[in-house]
Amino acid sequence: MNKTLFATAALLLVTAAPAFADEKPAEMSFQRDGDTYVYTRAELPGRVVLAGRRLPAGDSFELTVRGAQVTGTVGDRSVSFKMPRARTRAGSTTVVAAR
């Protein structure tokens, strides 16, 4: 359950549009299963760092994303997992390249 939750959250967070590069990272948020996740996103060479907290519990997290691999801490636990590939809806058509 937690692995799926954080994989989904990491995929959502990494694909979100970043704030302007020269400004302090803007705090962003999303809700899932009745909890609110507040975080910042920092793009560094070769990785993206997501740091924030889960409300109302206040648990903190810091996740480092390198390619499809996610590592970091959630509360006092270490986590490591691969992000799932993005899937299209059944019946939809995706054009990858066209001439």
Image (tube, rainbow, N blue to C red):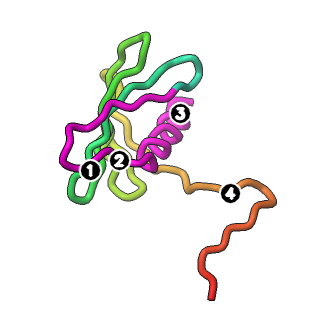
Q: Are marks 2 and 1 in contact (CB under 8 Å)?
A: yes
Q: Residues within 10 Å of mark 2 (few under 14, many from 20)?
A: some
Q: Which residue is label 1 attached to?
A: 43
Query: How far is disc 3 from disc 2 in space, using C-alphas?
Result: 22 Å
Q: Which residue is label 3 attached to?
A: 5
Q: Residue 87 in the image: state x and y as whole percent.
A: 64, 55
Query: Which sits in the foreground, 5 or 53?
Result: 53
Instruction: Tell whether 44 sits left or right of 37.
Output: left
Q: Amino acid at mark 2?
A: Pro
The magenta span reads 1-30
Mark toward the viewer: 1 or 3: 1
Per the image, label 2 sits on a secondary structure element best described as loop
Per the image, label 1 sits on a secondary structure element best described as strand
- Residue at 36% x, 18% y: name it: 59
Instruction: Reply above or below: 52 against 41.
Output: above
Instruction: Tell whether 58 sits left or right of 6.
Output: left
Q: Residue 53 in the image: state x and y as whole percent.
A: 35, 22
Q: Is residue 92 visible?
A: yes
Mark seen at residue 83:
none
Q: Amino acid at mark 4?
A: Thr
Of mark 4 and mark 2, the one earlier in the sequence is 2
Q: Is residue 73 visible?
A: no
Q: Which residue is label 2 attached to?
A: 18
Instruction: Reply above or below: 15 against 93.
Output: above
Mark toward the viewer: 3 or 2: 2
Q: Are marks 3 and 2 in contact (CB under 8 Å)?
A: no
Q: Are marks 1 and 4 in contact (CB under 8 Å)?
A: no
- Residue at 21% x, 58% y: name it: 45
Q: Amino acid at mark 3?
A: Leu
Q: Residue 22 in the image: state x and y as whole percent.
A: 18, 48
Q: Which residue is label 4 attached to?
A: 88
- Residue at 22% x, 52% y: name it: 44
